[in-house]
Image (tube, rainbow, N blue to C red):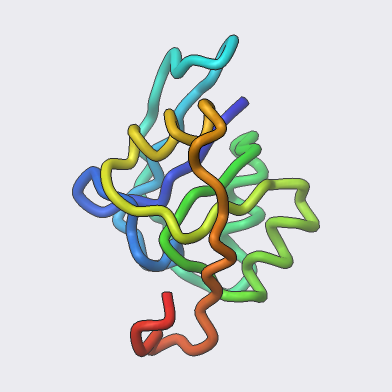
Amino acid sequence: MKIAVASNGGLVTEHFGHCEVFNIYNEENGSIVGADRIPNPGHRPGFLPVFLHEMGVNVIISGGMGGGAIQLFNEKDIEVITGAGGDAKLAAEGYLKGELKSTGSVCHEHMHHGEC
């Protein structure tokens, strides 16, 4: 399994599309066995769900995300976890332990106004 965490400076970002990097954690037998840092190739409507799907990502973790992106990830069978925060690797490990659940945090405007 591959878990992508939208990150800024090693921390989960508030809005996935504006992150600096995607930390991609490779899981085997419930543990992280490898990681890659992939620079965000740019926020364009509909692009990032396809980009991450083509990388083999199964789960995306972020602080918040727009409803359109959530729908696109769902169409690609990528599980969306929103409402996360803190250290990116700890978020991925929390997901693997079943401790990190999505809060359903959806951004409704690109200015975000504290909604993420």
Rendering coords of residue 104 (x, y %): 59, 65
Task: Please indicate whether residue 6 sits to the left or right of residue 50 in the image.
Answer: left
Of 38 and 13, the residue lying toward us: 13
Rendering coords of residue 6 (x, y %): 40, 52
Task: Please indicate whether residue 87 sits to the left or right of residue 106 in the image.
Answer: left
User: What's the residue at 33%, 59% (across, down)?
Assistant: 13
User: What's the residue at 46%, 60% (across, down)?
Assistant: 83
User: What's the residue at 30%, 56% (across, down)?
Assistant: 20
Give the position of the N terminus as an image quadrant.
top right
In the rendered image of this protein, does residue 47 appear above or below residue 37? below
Give the position of the C terminus as an image quadrant.
bottom left
Task: Please indicate whether residue 90 sits to the left or right of residue 4 in the image.
Answer: left
Give the mark count. Answer: 0
Of 46 and 66, the residue lying toward us: 66
* View extreme (left): residue: 9
Residue 71 figure quarter: bottom right
Residue 47 figure quarter: bottom right
User: What's the residue at 45%, 56% (across, down)?
Assistant: 62
Rendering coords of residue 87 (x, y %): 27, 42
Rendering coords of residue 55 (x, y %): 59, 37
In the rendered image of this protein, does residue 72 appear above or below residue 115? above
Residue 111 figure quarter: bottom left
